[in-house]
């Protein structure tokens, strides 16, 4: 697994590791319950296999250490929070996590504890009979859904930034829905069967003997253990709340005043970034990348107190240099004021006067196509302006439908070239649309050249650069005169790839990143590395003599291109 997935402090790694252990346990437990849909023997057979692992000495230590570690770190994280404002997904996961012990404690006491202390045979049948006549069955069913949703959110938040995860998420959504539904179907099927048996007096006595059914005294003792465990849990929550409030009061005594030009003024806790201060106080502050120091849309001009701020880190300095920011400009997501400051938000969340909401922009991962006509200057030398415009319009009329038919939009025309973007719901569909558009452009150009040859005019050659990357889409320009456009490194990469097609004598250079997103497999030896001007890292890309040659790799059953 990519080492980047495990970056962070030891607490982060422990939380991820313990969470994965618990998620794996829940997955196999739910599959086990679901087997009741087919036959009791399948259900009990898998349970015997699971308990061989989980109730072995080592398995027990690993499982309960993971449970206590994960719960402890979650409570510690809540106690350390500077604010309870958080994204919806994070808040939902936290609430679900706090609901789990309310039912899980009862489940553990009446199964594992009962088995260890009173030698109760806690097979699935025992558990189902124990719950079936009352509302406990619905509470435990709710526990199943709560655990599963909590785990799925955690897994997604961990892996969402990896490229391979984004590609398989649509399929995993189906799996995520299937697992709890399968478990519920198995539970209800087995529950009806075993409760029907339990209603027969002769079979009931056999079940009671087989499971070594607890006595009323044992049930009472287990209820005491459950209540004590729940009391401990509630006491832990109260302690977390007291720690949180105590830290908040302490920080308030160590706070800093921040004045925003055009309002408001606020007092926030030292140690927070300026962006966190804005979010904690409900002050609108644009931050398209979520505070990663990448998009620079949270930048502010420090009008007073700049000398009290530490110098920019390497990350902040690079981002500010990339946008040509003034020395007084800083990123709100990177600075942590300790003395009073006055700041001006460069990007107003409301877009400023006479601007639409779209002026803020949005960050997306999309395919970008850069296209240029070859030898245009030499071809049009000596021609009248009218003839040049007429040729260009005929050319664009011929090829642009290939872009729009795939859902693409021409962002801008640049003389004899254009820049197009494919704004699709996800990166994979955007990559496929861009690749299909390049193919269709090649076919459209062939047809257009046939018309030119019939008229006695020379053929037109083109070069295309196609890349998938992060973009910011938004309105750029003076208030009331802003046009929607795109900016970002992906545009520069696509442009540089198009420039490389001239020296190579090919029609298309498509980045390997786009090919992977489009699920197109090519021979490794066909991929070349390009050191592009203005791009820090070499870009692997596939040279294609004619884009139409990519037809088999996109439309055929075998996703292979062989040069």
Image (spheres, rainbow, N blue to C red):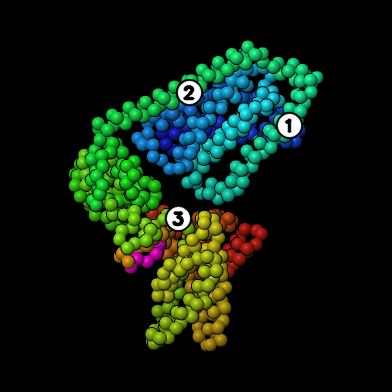
Tag 3–tag 1 contact (CB < 8 Å): no
**Does label 1 or label 2 sit earlier along the sequence?**
1
Q: Residue at x 33, y 49 (%)?
A: 285
In this picture, is 172 found above or below 451? above
Q: Secondary structure at mark 2?
A: helix
The residue that mark 3 highlights is: 364
The circle on residue 233 is 2
Measured as percent of width and height from the top left, residue 112 is found at 61, 20
The circle on residue 245 is none
> Is disc 2 surrounded by few (<14), some (14 to 19) or many (20+) residues within 10 Å?
some
Q: Secondary structure at mark 1?
A: helix
Specify the segment rendered in magenta: 481-488
Measured as percent of width and height from the top left, residue 408 is found at 50, 66
> How far apart are the alpha carbons under marks 2 and 3?
42 Å
Judged by depth in the image, the label closer to the viewer, 3 or 1, is 1
What type of secondary structure mainly makes up the magenta span? strand
| In magenta stretch: residue 484 | yes
Q: In the image, is 359 to the left or to the right of 344?
A: right
Q: Quadrant of residue 322?
A: bottom left
Residue farthest along the top direction in this orientation: 217
Q: In the image, is 417 to the left or to the right of 136?
A: left
Measured as percent of width and height from the top left, residue 17 is found at 51, 32
Q: Residue at x 35, y 35 (%)?
A: 82
Measured as percent of width and height from the top left, residue 443 is found at 57, 73
Q: Secondary structure at mark 3?
A: strand
Judged by depth in the image, the label closer to the viewer, 1 or 2, is 1
**Does label 3 or label 1 sit earlier along the sequence?**
1
Q: Quadrant of residue 42?
A: top right
Tag 2–tag 3 contact (CB < 8 Å): no
- Quarter occupied by the C terminus: bottom right
Q: Residue at x 31, y 64 (%)?
A: 479
């Amino acid at each position: 697994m990519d080492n980047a997935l495990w970056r962070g402090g030891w607490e982060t790694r422990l939380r991820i590791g313990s969470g994965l252990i618990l998620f794996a346990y829940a997955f196999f437990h739910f599959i086990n319950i679901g087997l009741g849909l087919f036959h009791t023997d399948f259900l009990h057979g898998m349970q015997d296999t699971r308990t061989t692992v989980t109730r072995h000495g080592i398995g027990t230590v690993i499982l309960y250490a993971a449970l206590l570690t994960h719960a402890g770190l979650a409570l510690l994280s809540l106690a350390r929070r500077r604010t309870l404002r958080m994204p919806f997904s994070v808040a939902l996961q936290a609430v679900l996590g706090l609901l789990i012990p309310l039912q899980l404690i009862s489940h553990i006491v009446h199964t594992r504890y009962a088995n260890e202390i009173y030698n109760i045979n806690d097979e699935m049948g025992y558990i189902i009979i124990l719950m079936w006549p009352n509302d406990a069955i619905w509470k435990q069913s709710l526990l199943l859904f709560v655990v599963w949703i909590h785990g799925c959110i955690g897994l997604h938040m961990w892996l969402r930034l990896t490229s391979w995860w984004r590609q398989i998420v649509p399929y995993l959504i189906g799996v995520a829905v299937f697992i709890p539904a399968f478990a519920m179907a198995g539970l209800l099927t087995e529950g009806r069967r075993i409760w029907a048996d339990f209603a027969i007096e002769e079979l009931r006595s056999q079940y009671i003997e087989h499971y070594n059914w607890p006595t009323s005294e044992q049930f009472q003792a287990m209820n005491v253990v459950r209540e004590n465990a729940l009391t401990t849990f509630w006491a832990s929550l109260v302690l977390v709340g007291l720690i949180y409030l105590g830290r908040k009061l302490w920080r308030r005594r160590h706070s800093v005043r921040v004045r925003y030009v055009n309002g408001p003024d606020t007092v926030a806790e030292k140690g927070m970034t300026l962006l966190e201060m804005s979010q904690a106080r409900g002050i609108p502050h644009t931050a398209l990348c979520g505070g990663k120091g990448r998009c620079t849309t949270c930048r502010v001009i420090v009008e007073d107190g700049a000398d009290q701020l530490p110098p920019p880190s390497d990350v902040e300095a690079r981002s500010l240099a990339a946008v040509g920011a003034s020395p007084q400009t800083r990123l709100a997501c990177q600075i942590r004021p300790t003395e009073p400051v006055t700041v001006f938000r460069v990007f107003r969340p409301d877009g400023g006067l006479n601007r639409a909401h779209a002026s803020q922009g949005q960050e997306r991962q999309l395919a970008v196509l850069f296209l240029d006509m070859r030898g245009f200057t030499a071809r049009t030398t000596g021609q009248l302006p009218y003839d040049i415009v007429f040729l260009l319009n005929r050319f664009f009329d011929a090829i642009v439908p290939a872009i729009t038919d795939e859902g693409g939009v021409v962002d801008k025309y640049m003389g004899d070239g254009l820049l197009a973007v494919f704004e699709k719901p996800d990166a994979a569909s955007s990559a496929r649309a861009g690749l299909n558009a390049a193919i269709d452009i090649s076919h459209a150009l062939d047809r257009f050249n046939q018309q030119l040859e019939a008229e006695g005019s020379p053929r037109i050659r083109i070069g295309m650069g196609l890349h998938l990357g992060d973009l910011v889409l938004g309105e750029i320009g003076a208030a009331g005169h802003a046009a929607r456009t795109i900016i970002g490194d992906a545009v520069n990469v696509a442009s540089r790839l198009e420039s490389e097609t001239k020296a190579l004598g090919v029609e298309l250079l498509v980045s390997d990143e786009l090919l992977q997103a489009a699920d197109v497999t090519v021979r490794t030896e066909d991929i070349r590395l390009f050191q592009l001007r203005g791009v820090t890292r070499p870009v692997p890309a596939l040279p294609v003599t004619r884009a139409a040659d990519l037809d088999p790799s996109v439309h055929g059953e075998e996703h292979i291109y062989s040069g």
